[in-house]
Image: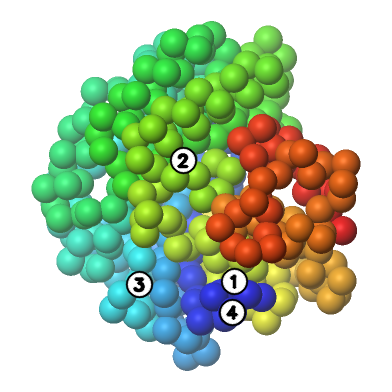
Amino acid sequence: MTAEATQKFGVYLHVPFCVRRCDYCAFATWTDREHLIDEYLAACRAQARTASTDLPDITSVFIGGGTPNLVPADTLMSIFRELPIAPTAEFTVECNPDLVDRQQMETYVAAGVNRVSLGVQSMVPHVLASLGREHNPDNVHAAVETIRDAGITRLNLDLIYGANGESIEDWKTSVESALSLHPEHLSTYALTVEPGTPLAEDVDRHPDDDDQADKYLLADDLITSAGLMNYEISNWARPGDECQHNMLYWTQGEYLGLGVAAHSHIAQRRFWSVRTPERFIKAIEKGSSVEAGAEELGPGAWALEGRQLAIRTSEGVLEEFVPHKVQHLTEPSNVAGKVKLSVEGRLLANEVSISLQ
């Protein structure tokens, strides 16, 4: 673990409820379990209360899903009254732009939320339809205004590229529209085909690698020109606005996962929770463990994993770990003796990562 990560500790809470399940989504989410929302959030609060006695000060919180802003804001925020959250902690909530409202945001801010991540995905209606998304792009602008009016000064927008029928001009429209909202942070993800999803079953909608490469390069050019710097393959931010919680993942930091299917990493041990709300609620009510599995890496595997994660970031890895055959895909980072992926190297990140020594 890096020196930076040893001083930080994160908490992730998974909210598994959605109005609609997107065609590409393989996360633990449900559209027919809203009757369990109150029980589930109560179970998460109980889990947090039990865990709190052994936790250090929490420096980052991330509430993801699913659709966190589908559930009652007061009840959701009450979970975090059980935890030792540092006054300066980064506190993020993922939100669906269609469901953002003023009272909700004010409740979040009163509880310490200082960062919102909006699931925009695209600003072009026919592309959203291809992804199986239903939100109205016009509502993104209204949501951002509401978020800003509530006093939240750190905003991330999530975009996805590579959907069937998305032209390069469509993608340019999405990126430029997102940048016009002046986010402090922007994430762009290549559409990925996950087994068992509706997208996986519809081969005609599978993304094209060359098309996605072109769109990544276009996005990098547009986003960098707007003053946001790439600090991880899929993430750009204004200096100082990098997502601290996600940096824990990329630096082998420690974090606790709350809720279904949530992953934790403490003392070089990774473990994860049961996947369904029913099993989770029942285990908490019985006082049983919600752990579904775990893994521990040996020293060699741990060190290699650290390098494979670090090569994704702008800090990079020591040059000595990069074989000659892939050195042309790297360039010097801002840290002496280290190299990072070049823009072209980011397109081949997996190939570089598995070749590291």
- The residue singled out by tag 4 in the image is 3
- Choose the circle earlier in sequence order: 1 or 4: 4
- Choose the circle earlier in sequence order: 2 or 3: 3
- The residue singled out by tag 1 in the image is 253
Q: What distance separates the C-alpha of mark 4 from that of mark 3?
A: 18 Å
Give above or below for 69 relative to 217: below
Q: What distance separates the C-alpha of mark 2 from that of mark 4?
A: 26 Å
- The residue singled out by tag 3 in the image is 89
- The residue singled out by tag 2 in the image is 187
Q: Residues within 10 Å of mark 4 (few under 14, many from 20)?
A: few
Q: What distance separates the C-alpha of mark 2 from that of mark 3?
A: 21 Å
Q: Residue at x 69, y 37 (%)?
A: 345
Residue kind at label 4, given as amino acid type? Ala
Q: What distance separates the C-alpha of mark 2 from that of mark 1?
A: 21 Å
Q: State whether residue 90 appears in this view.
A: yes
Per the image, label 1 sits on a secondary structure element best described as loop
The answer to whether marks 3 and 1 mark residues whose Cβ atoms lie closer than 8 Å is no
